[in-house]
Image (cartoon, helix red, strand yellow):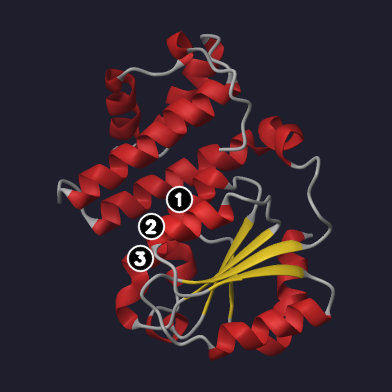
Amino acid sequence: FRMPRAVKKEDLPTASDIDLLCGALLSKTDNAADNFILSARRDGVNVEAIYLGYVAGAAKRLGNMWDEDRISFMQVTLACGKLYRIIRALRHVVAPAIIGDRDEYPAMFALVPGETHSIGIEMATDLFRREGWDVDLLLGVDHDKLLENADKRNYQAIVLVAHSDGMLEALARLVLALRISHPLAHVFVAGHILDHHPDAGDIVGADAVIKDIKTAIADLRNVIA
């Protein structure tokens, strides 16, 4: 996390607090989680504790519940959508601590773990670099290693490429993890997975999808602008 580390232990949520937030995220009441966070803010919980404690804790708990088959893919997807909304609402508060030393056009292009077809993403990387983007390319690394590498920089754009029909869950896990570690980045989905799941971007909570390499640069700039 790129938030200030001076968060007191007593400001962090208890396991019961995380249970309540996850319950709100999984609730059919659309704004239950928003109200939970607003209540914590009114009680004086600072934004770093909310971000590092509540948001990160809820994301981890949802992941564990998914791993243990206590919630379905659709439930965790809907809950994560609400979590993304909280993250976006905090952007204006956390931005000064994140954006200060960012390069002009830093971007990360990554092949979703498990994918092997890299020609398209390598071509796109070359194209963006020729247009002045500073692109880090990550290929053939697992989920944890990808996150470890991603944490070294503050990215303006993150493009995740998947091709296979069965990569939707791996893509969703990756988007969630990157939303937590890079709250200001714009996350894009590209690749042939869009042929299998035209709504993949909406399902996993991406900001947009890239359907055509010819218009990719213009598409990214338009979304970021």
The quarter holding residue 117 reads bottom left
Q: Does dot 3 land on a helix, a strand or a loop?
A: helix
Count of residue discs? 3
What label sits on residue 177 in the rendered view? 1
What label sits on residue 173 in the rendered view? 2
**Image coords of residue 52 (percent x, y):** 50, 29
* Outermost residue to the left: 69
C-alpha separation, residue under disc 3 versus residue under disc 2: 5 Å
Taking the spot 66% from the left edge, 47% from the top edge, the residue there is 184
Q: Does dot 1 land on a helix, a strand or a loop?
A: helix
- Whether label 3 touches label 2, CB < 8 Å: yes
Assign the C terminus to one quadrant of the image.
Answer: bottom right
Assign the N terminus to one quadrant of the image.
Answer: top right
At label 2, counting other C-alpha atoms closer than 10 Å, the crowd grade (few under 14, some 14-19, many 20 or more) is: some
Is 40 left, or right, of 73 in this rendering? right
C-alpha separation, residue under disc 1 versus residue under disc 3: 11 Å
Q: Name the residue tied to disc 3.
A: 170
Q: Amino acid at mark 2?
A: Arg
Toward the viewer: 149 or 212?
A: 149
